Amino acid sequence: MSSDDVASFLDTREKQKTFEDTIKRLSNNTQNGIQKTNKNFEDFCKEYYEKTTEQVLEELKLFKGDKLDQKTRSVIQNWINWQYEKGILTSTIKQRVSRIKRLLRFSRVKVHFEDFEEPLEFSAKIKEELYELTLQDIQTIFKLTKPKPSQC
């Protein structure tokens, strides 16, 4: 009998630990961000896979090694693409991807995004081209605002 097969009272507390317990020492803003990310991932799982987050994570745990990395990358990339379809900006998606790692770790899905054979793909950030306002632009703005006459 290996040490993995031994039932221990030490495991009892660990099994009762919730995800919320693992993040409760973080700032309120960080906790809120993580909870919103988990909700977003839950919405994705329901819509895309027609499964709960828990079911998707349990399915991932069936795989090992390179196959686990491939499947996890596929799920995360599908989530990224799904968010783009919803109009979410790249900066927000990248934040969410970094936050979802906590949930994966808690669920015992061990994966390092940096080690994926193919990196996760994000759309390029769209930068607004800035330009100086001309005198004509300023005059046009003032013409359109039509200030109310002052009452003296």
Image (tube, rainbow, N blue to C red):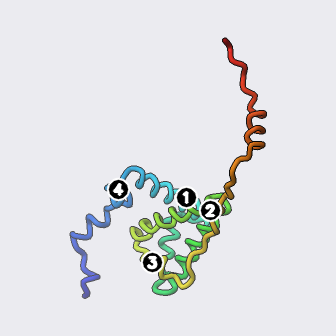
Indicate the quadrant containing the N terminus: top left, top right, bottom left or bottom right: bottom left
N-terminal-most mark, 4 or 2? 4
N-terminal-most mark, 3 or 2? 2
Identify residue for label 2: 83
Kind of element beneath mark 2:
helix
- How far across and how far down the image is residue 108, in percent? 40, 73
Residue furthest to the left = 9
Name the kind of residue labelled 1 in the image: Asn
Identify residue for label 4: 26
Per the rendering, the mark at residue 112 is 3
Dot 3 alpha-carbon crowd within 10 angstroms: few under 14, some 14 to 19, many 20 or more: few
N-terminal-most mark, 1 or 3? 1
Residue situated in front as seen by the camera: 42 or 138: 138
Report whether 71 appears left or right of 5: right
What residue lies at 53% left-to-right and 65% top-to-bottom?
94
What residue lies at 66% left-to-right and 62% top-to-bottom?
126
Name the kind of residue labelled 2 in the image: Gln
N-terminal-most mark, 4 or 1? 4
Kindly report the distance in space between the C-alpha atoms of the residues bearing marks 4 and 2: 26 Å
N-terminal-most mark, 3 or 4? 4
**Image position of 53 with respect to 109: above or below:** above
Identify residue for label 1: 40
Q: Are marks 3 and 2 in contact (CB under 8 Å)?
A: no
Dot 1 alpha-carbon crowd within 10 angstroms: few under 14, some 14 to 19, many 20 or more: some
> Which of labels 1 and 3 is toward the front?
3
Residue situated in front as seen by the camera: 43 or 5: 43
Q: Are marks 1 and 2 in contact (CB under 8 Å)?
A: yes
